[in-house]
Each structure stands twice: as structure tokens, then as C-alpha cells.
Image (tube, rainbow, N blue to C red):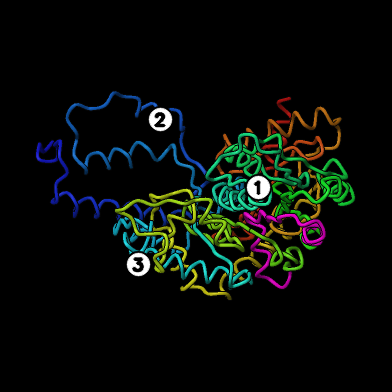
């Protein structure tokens, strides 16, 4: 081995060989991604290689990267590929890929104009374009976050501030000690991230009350209204859910907006992936009324197909964000500076330039391209639903209003307890098999698969292959039992 490759300090002359290696690997990886299974190799065996103490003397950049590429590949999930349906994970469009590589290369701090004029200007422009894409009010203020969880954090922090100011306190300044409980009301569709955020905000996870009319979690609107009426005009926060994770169903957002207006409540819409229904005439009725909300969030590394991580929060009242996330020091850009300053609109001060990828994909493909992509996935979901309905040993468990198909393996000769056991084992078998990546959920007490389709690379051939793989593995699990 050439000793010049080793060292304890970075060297400028490492960069050309590093870039050549990385671009060669990136090109090869992406070229085979469409044909690759969701996972290859044994991740446990691969990860064992990395169990070592900190080296006293480094190996140098090239050798370290060669080791990462050569040894790490078996532990990769090909999450950007067309066979990954578990966590509503999109891919990365070519435009977003190129822009994100530039974001890493340029290494901009997207805190404020002072730290990077380009990064903050592109974030400002991208958020304006996203409001146009989703037909949200142009006066709303947006900010980029790491994903839907932190987008919910931003929006619900604004809701907490709104509630506090109506209760006679400043939560961001004084905290919540001695404050009355903040009522948070929603349906059974509420996502775990919104509940988590209530703990992070000091409101408490137990503050979230769900109103459900059935085991699936559909909202009990009369019960919700009775709860609002019982507050005697005290402020409350309503959470409407656009895109439930098991079936892709929606709360009736317009009805939530009516309740919020009648009872003076804050309406937050969690649209992590469901907000994208807004951009197709075929599905925009599902999010009717979202423009009447006080805040709404969505996720870019889902249906927008930009790289991890990328989320967006939009809030009607900019002042609530500024008071929630007040942040200043003599050396920083001042909050009253008219130039963009996203560090005072969200929790993060150290912010990567995630707007590069967002701006590039919106510029490259426009409204029409993204509408076409959404409708492609709507078609794929219907195709998958038909394949499930046609298979004698599969059972669809819900309608398909958007991009999720909830179904289970059902050979016809098992009771419910045995079906749950077989389908739970089937989910484990799918992950271990590696050809596709899909996990199980529980819907009304029934263990099921819930593939979610948002990747631009996925086609009908992948749906057909997935169905046959599920049936093959299901029969194997059934026989083994």
C-alpha cells in the first residue's frame, strides 16, 4: 500500500481521486438501481466489519471510501429504487440528485442571507413555488425542515403560541408551568409524529384526544363538536389528517375547517404525503378546505422525490413563528432585517441547503411533470388493487383513494388468529427475501401489508412482480406453519 494515502490530516490532492471514485460508484449504482432488488447480501455480516476501535492513524480518504463502498453495500437498503414500498419513501429525480450533490459541494449554511444569499433565496423561491403547486394562500409563511416530524413541530409550535397568547401567557418566553391544559383534538388517523411533537413542545402526548366512529379510526364529527362545545370558547387545536398511513384515507378537512371557524379553534393539517392529492384534478377533492387551515405540512422526500431530508411547514401567521423561534445575537443577522432569515422561523440554526434539490426538481419538471408523476402512482395503486382482487389467495382490506393498497395473504383455510400469525411471518419473510421492501401494519386487528407508491422509478412491472413475490412467500410461510 502506498503510504502517501495515509495520514492524519486532510489533503487537497485527495480530492480528485475521491471525486473520481465517488462518481464512478454513483454512476454504477444508479445504472443498476432499476433492476436491483430492494436489498442484497447479509446486513448483519456486513456491519460486523465496522465493529472496530477508532484508528490511531487514519487510512486516508481514498482507502476509507473504498472500504465503505466495498464493505458497506450489503447493508444498504436500495431506498431510492422502484421496489421500496414501506415508509412512503420517494426516490430522487435526476435534477434533485444533481442539485443535492452541488449542495454538498458548496456546503452552504442556509441560516440566513448573511450566511448564504443563494441558499436562502432558493428556499424562499422554492417555498413560494410549493404554495403555488398546492394552491395555498400566497400570504402564508413557509420554512424547510428535516421532514414531516419537524414540520409538525414548527406548525404546532405556532399553534401553541397562538393558544398561549389567547390564554394570557407567552409559551416560548415563559414556558407552560402553571398554564391550563392545551386541548388537542383529532381523529384516529393522527400520525405518531404529531403525538410525539406534543411531548417535545411540553404540551404532553396525553393531551391528544382522538374521536373515532369505528375501529379504523374514522373521525366522529359529532363527538368532536361536543368536545369543542364543552370548552366554552376556550382555544383548542384541531389536527386534520391528509393521508392516513394504513389506507391513504383522509379526514374531511372542510368539515374540520367548519368546526374550527364555529368554535374559534386552530386548524392544523398534517399532509405529509396526502397534500400532494391537491395537484391532481382526480384527487384534489380529498383535500378540499386545506386553504382554510391555520397551518399545513408536507414532506419532500416522499412524493416530491427529493433526497432525504426535506420537509415543509406553512403557517398563516408569520408573527407566531417569529415569536415561537425568537433567536438573536450581536453577530447574527438581526430578526428585523428584510432579507431572508429562516433561522428565526424554525428550530434549526444549522441548516443545510436542502432548497437546492427542491428548486431544481420544481424548475426541471414544473407543475405538469409533478402532476403526471402523482397520477402515475394513482394508476399504479389501482393496478395493484386489481391484481390483489384477482388473486385467489390475497384479500384487499380497504378502498384505495390515493397511493396505498392495504391487503393480506389469505389462503382461505385459516381463522383470524392464524391469518395474523401467517401475515406477520410473511412481512418478515419479505424483508429477509430482499426482492421487495414492504412491511406490515395492523388494520382493525388484522395484520396486513400496506405498500405505498411514490417513487418515480416504479412501474406496473414492479407491481406485478411484487404480487407474485407476496404470493410465493405467503405459500412458503403457510406450508412451513
Most foreground residue, 355 or 67: 355
Most foreground residue, 360 or 64: 360
Q: Is residue 69 above or below residue 17?
A: above
Q: Is 325 part of what is drawn in magenta?
A: no
**Gap in Å between the C-alphas at discs 1 and 2?**
54 Å
Upstream in sequence: badge 1 or badge 2: 2
- The label nearer to you, 1 versus 2, is 1
Would you identify the image quadrant in which residue 379 lies?
bottom right
Q: Secondary structure at mark 3?
A: helix
**Gap in Å between the C-alphas at discs 3 and 2?**
39 Å
Most foreground residue, 315 or 451: 315
Residue 296 drawn at (x, y percent): 63, 58
Residue 95 drawn at (x, y percent): 43, 66
**Gap in Å between the C-alphas at discs 1 and 3?**
40 Å
Report the magenta residues as a range.
Answer: 256-282
- Please give the label number shown on residue 47: 2
Residue identifier under label 3 = 118
Q: Quadrant of the N terminus?
A: top left
Would you identify the image quadrant in which residue 205 lies?
top right
Q: Secondary structure at mark 1?
A: loop
Upstream in sequence: badge 1 or badge 3: 3
User: Along the horizontal axis of the image, is 263 left or right of 123?
Assistant: right
Q: Quadrant of the C terminus?
A: top right
Q: Secondary structure at mark 2?
A: helix
Upstream in sequence: badge 3 or badge 2: 2
- Please give the label number shown on residue 168: 1
Residue located 78% across and 42% down the image: 210
Q: Would residue 386 be visible to someone looking at this image? A: no
Amino acid at each position: 500500500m502506498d503510504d502517501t494515502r495515509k495520514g492524519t490530516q486532510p489533503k487537497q490532492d485527495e480530492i480528485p481521486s475521491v471525486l473520481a471514485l465517488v462518481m464512478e460508484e454513483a454512476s454504477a449504482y444508479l445504472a443498476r438501481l432499476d433492476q436491483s432488488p430492494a436489498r442484497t447480501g447479509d446486513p448483519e455480516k456486513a456491519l460486523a466489519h465496522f465493529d472496530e476501535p477508532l484508528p490511531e492513524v487514519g487510512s486516508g480518504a481514498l482507502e476509507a471510501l473504498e472500504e465503505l463502498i466495498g464493505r458497506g453495500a450489503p447493508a444498504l437498503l436500495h431506498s431510492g429504487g422502484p421496489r421500496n414500498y414501506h415508509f412512503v419513501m420517494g426516490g430522487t429525480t435526476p435534477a434533485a440528485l444533481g442539485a443535492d450533490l452541488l449542495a454538498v459541494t458548496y456546503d452552504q449554511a442556509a441560516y440566513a442571507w448573511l450566511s448564504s444569499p443563494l441558499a436562502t433565496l432558493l428556499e424562499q423561491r422554492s417555498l413560494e413555488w410549493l404554495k403555488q403547486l398546492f394552491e395555498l394562500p400566497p400570504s402564508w409563511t413557509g420554512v424547510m425542515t428535516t421532514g414531516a416530524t419537524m414540520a409538525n413541530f414548527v406548525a404546532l409550535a405556532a399553534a401553541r403560541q397562538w393558544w398561549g397568547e389567547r390564554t394570557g401567557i407567552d409559551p416560548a418566553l415563559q414556558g407552560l408551568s402553571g398554564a391550563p391544559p392545551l386541548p388537542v383534538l383529532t381523529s384516529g388517523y393522527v400520525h405518531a409524529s404529531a403525538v410525539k411533537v406534543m411531548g417535545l413542545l411540553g404540551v404532553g402526548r396525553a393531551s391528544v384526544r382522538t374521536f373515532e366512529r369505528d375501529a379504523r379510526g374514522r373521525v366522529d364529527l359529532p363527538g368532536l363538536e361536543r368536545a369543542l362545545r364543552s370548552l366554552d370558547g376556550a382555544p383548542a387545536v384541531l389536527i386534520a389528517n391528509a393521508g392516513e398511513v394504513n389506507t391513504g384515507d383522509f379526514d374531511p378537512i372542510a368539515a374540520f375547517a367548519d368546526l374550527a371557524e364555529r368554535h374559534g379553534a386552530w386548524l392544523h393539517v398534517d399532509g405529509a404525503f396526502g397534500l400532494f392529492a391537491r395537484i391532481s384534478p382526480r384527487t384534489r377533492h380529498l383535500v378540499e378546505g386545506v386553504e382554510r387551515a391555520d397551518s399545513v405540512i408536507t414532506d419532500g422526500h416522499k412524493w416530491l422525490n427529493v433526497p432525504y431530508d426535506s420537509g415543509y411547514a406553512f403557517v398563516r401567521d408569520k408573527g407566531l413563528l417569529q415569536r415561537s423561534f425568537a433567536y438573536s445575537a450581536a453577530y447574527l443577522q438581526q430578526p428585523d432585517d428584510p432579507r431572508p432569515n429562516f433561522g428565526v422561523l424554525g428550530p434549526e440554526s444549522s441548516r443545510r441547503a436542502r432548497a437546492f434539490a427542491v428548486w431544481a426538481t420544481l424548475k426541471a419538471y414544473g407543475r405538469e411533470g409533478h402532476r403526471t408523476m402523482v397520477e402515475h402512482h394513482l394508476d399504479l395503486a389501482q393496478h395493484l388493487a386489481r391484481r390483489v382482487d384477482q388473486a385467489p389467495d390475497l384479500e384487499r382490506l380497504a378502498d384505495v383513494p390515493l397511493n396505498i393498497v392495504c391487503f393480506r395473504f389469505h389462503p382461505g383455510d385459516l381463522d383470524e388468529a392464524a391469518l395474523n400469525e401467517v401475515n406477520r411471518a410473511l412481512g418478515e419473510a419479505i424483508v429477509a427475501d430482499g426482492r421487495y421492501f414492504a412491511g406490515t401494519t395492523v388494520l382493525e386487528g388484522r395484520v396486513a401489508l400496506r405498500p405505498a407508491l411514490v417513487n418515480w422509478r416504479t412501474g406496473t412491472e414492479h407491481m406485478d412482480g411484487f404480487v407474485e413475490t407476496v404470493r410465493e412467500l405467503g405459500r412458503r410461510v403457510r406450508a412451513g406453519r
